[in-house]
Image: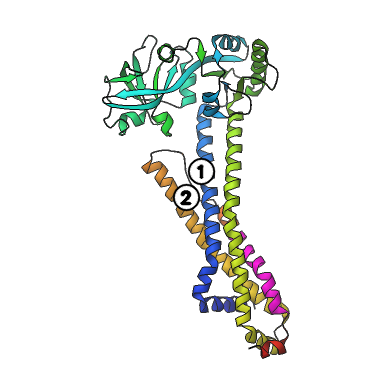
């Protein structure tokens, strides 16, 4: 019986090919949008999680800026500063293994006749340098690393050395000008995976302090926690100590103390909100698709009123008539969902290709999630069935005599 219902539904859809395709457009556009957005969102979160895993869970970041802000933008826009006194307080705590500060700023960088604004990072050259290597995930590709006293030397990012960032590609021992001051290129940093880091330059902390006109100031202080010490517990201790020394009230701090896990949770929460909003917008197409299925089913029932009357006259029950039209509505949803899933993954894979191959940014890695595929197909099928309930009920409630008399 079920097979017969399926055959009747497929036959009806085939007889109205153009209308059927138009009916499914809303479904597969909506499913394609949802699948591609979820895939891209998951891929981005995976890439971010991977970057934080490289940093390690034993790190704490102390940043200028009030509580509630997230990341680089909050640090760059904050008027507050971290000072040498803050670093001394942090180093005194028993759970701190190593702590050090760095500064960074977007400034004019010139090579040959081309000038661009790039981030220049002033990093320490003492025993705290390893923390920054872990956090920045950078490794030397060519040349040598910065050492104490190398205040006229610079390391350049992968994009500066191997793309047309400056039109002409700088080489080791070339001169590059930062804020009109000459620096000799002594090394190239391997690709990190995002344009900002891969187009950055690294000089010694003292050199950056002279360039930026700052003294005993830090853009961020990084802390490595001793073994068997919980980063979250130490972060709370540091927050209390700094708040007391700065004479600031709780909740009104001009700084943030965050573990890598806390920062990751904040970033993921922000991404979840953005994904939810985008998916909600994309779901409007699914609502339109559902209305389209309902409209098509009503039209189909009107066109097949006499057929319904004949089926009832020869013994078809109300539940059988209902099932026939629900099967048809479900097939609209299933086929539309299938096309939508295929389109969605094609869109997300295209975005991954453009990001990784064309833009050379390792921010996305789209994977085929069977739960997402199954969920999308189930949702679209259920949506189709729900959209067909009222039209199918109307068909099932028809009186055979009235249906046979219908013109």
Whether residues under marks 1 and 2 lie with C-beta atoms below 8 angstroms apart, the answer is yes
Magenta-colored span: 377-397
Q: Is residue 367 visible?
A: yes
> Mark 2: which secondary structure?
helix
Residue lying at 33% horizontally and 21% vertically, measured from the top left: 187
Looking at the rendering, in which quadrant would you find the N terminus? bottom right
Residue 143 appears in view: no
Q: How is the image coloured?
A: rainbow
Pointer 1 residue: 43
Q: Quadrant of residue 324?
A: bottom right
Q: How many marks?
A: 2
Residue 186 spot, x, y in % from top left? 31, 19
Decide: few, some or many residues near mark 2? Use Cα within 10 Å; few <14, some 14-19, many ≥20: many
Mark 1–mark 2 Cα distance, whole angstroms, equals 9 Å
Q: Which disc number belongs to residue 348?
A: 2
Residue at 42 percent across and 42 percent down: it is 355
* Residue 396 lies in the magenta stretch: yes
Residue 375 numbered mark, or none: none
Locate residue 315 relative to residue 225 in the image: left or right: right
Chief SS of the magenta region: helix
User: As displayed, is residue 75 above or below residue 330?
Assistant: above
Among numbered discs 1 and 2, the one appearing first in the sequence: 1
Where residue 96 sits: x, y (%)? 59, 14
Q: Mark 1: few, some, or many residues within 10 Å (few <14, many ≥20)? A: some
Residue 167, percent across and down? 28, 32
């Amino acid at each position: 019986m079920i097979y017969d219902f399926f055959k009747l539904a497929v036959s009806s859809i085939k007889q109205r090919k153009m209308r059927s395709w138009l009916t499914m457009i809303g479904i597969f556009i909506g499913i394609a949008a949802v699948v591609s957005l979820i895939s891209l969102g998951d891929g981005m979160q995976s890439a971010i999680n991977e970057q934080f895993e490289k940093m390690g869970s034993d790190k704490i970041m102390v940043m200028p800026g009030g509580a509630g802000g997230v990341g680089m933008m909050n640090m760059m826009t904050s008027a507050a500063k971290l000072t040498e006194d803050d670093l001394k307080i942090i180093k005194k705590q028993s759970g701190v293994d190593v702590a050090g500060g760095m500064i960074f700023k977007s400034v004019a960088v010139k090579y040959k006749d081309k000038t661009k604004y790039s981030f220049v990072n002033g990093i320490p050259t003492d025993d705290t340098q390893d923390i920054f290597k872990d956090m920045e995930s950078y490794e030397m590709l060519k040349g040598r690393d910065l050492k104490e006293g190398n205040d006229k030397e610079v390391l350049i990012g992968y994009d500066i050395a191997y793309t047309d960032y400056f039109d002409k590609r700088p080489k080791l021992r070339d001169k590059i000008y930062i804020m009109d001051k000459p620096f000799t290129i002594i090394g190239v940093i391997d690709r990190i995976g995002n344009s900002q880091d891969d187009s950055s330059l690294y000089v010694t902390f003292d050199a950056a302090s002279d360039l930026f006109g700052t003294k005993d100031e830090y853009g961020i202080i990084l802390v490595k926690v001793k073994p068997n010490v919980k980063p979250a517990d130490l972060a709370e201790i540091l927050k209390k100590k700094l708040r007391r020394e700065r004479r600031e009230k709780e909740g009104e701090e001009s700084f943030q103390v965050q573990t890598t896990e806390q920062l990751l949770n904040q970033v993921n929460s922000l991404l979840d909100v953005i994904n939810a909003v985008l998916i909600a917008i994309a779901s409007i197409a699914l609502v339109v698709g559902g209305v389209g299925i309902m409209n098509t089913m009503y039209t189909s029932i009107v066109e097949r009123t006499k057929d319904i009357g004949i089926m009832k006259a020869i013994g078809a029950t109300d539940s059988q008539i209902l099932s026939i039209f629900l099967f048809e509505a479900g097939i609209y949803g299933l086929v539309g969902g299938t096309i939508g899933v295929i389109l969605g993954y094609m869109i997300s894979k295209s975005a991954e290709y453009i990001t990784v191959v064309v833009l050379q940014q390792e921010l996305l890695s789209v994977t085929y999630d069977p739960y997402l595929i199954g969920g999308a197909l189930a949702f679209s099928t259920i949506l189709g069935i729900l959209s067909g309930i009222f039209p199918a009920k109307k068909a099932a409630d028809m009186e055979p005599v009235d249906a046979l008399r219908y013109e």
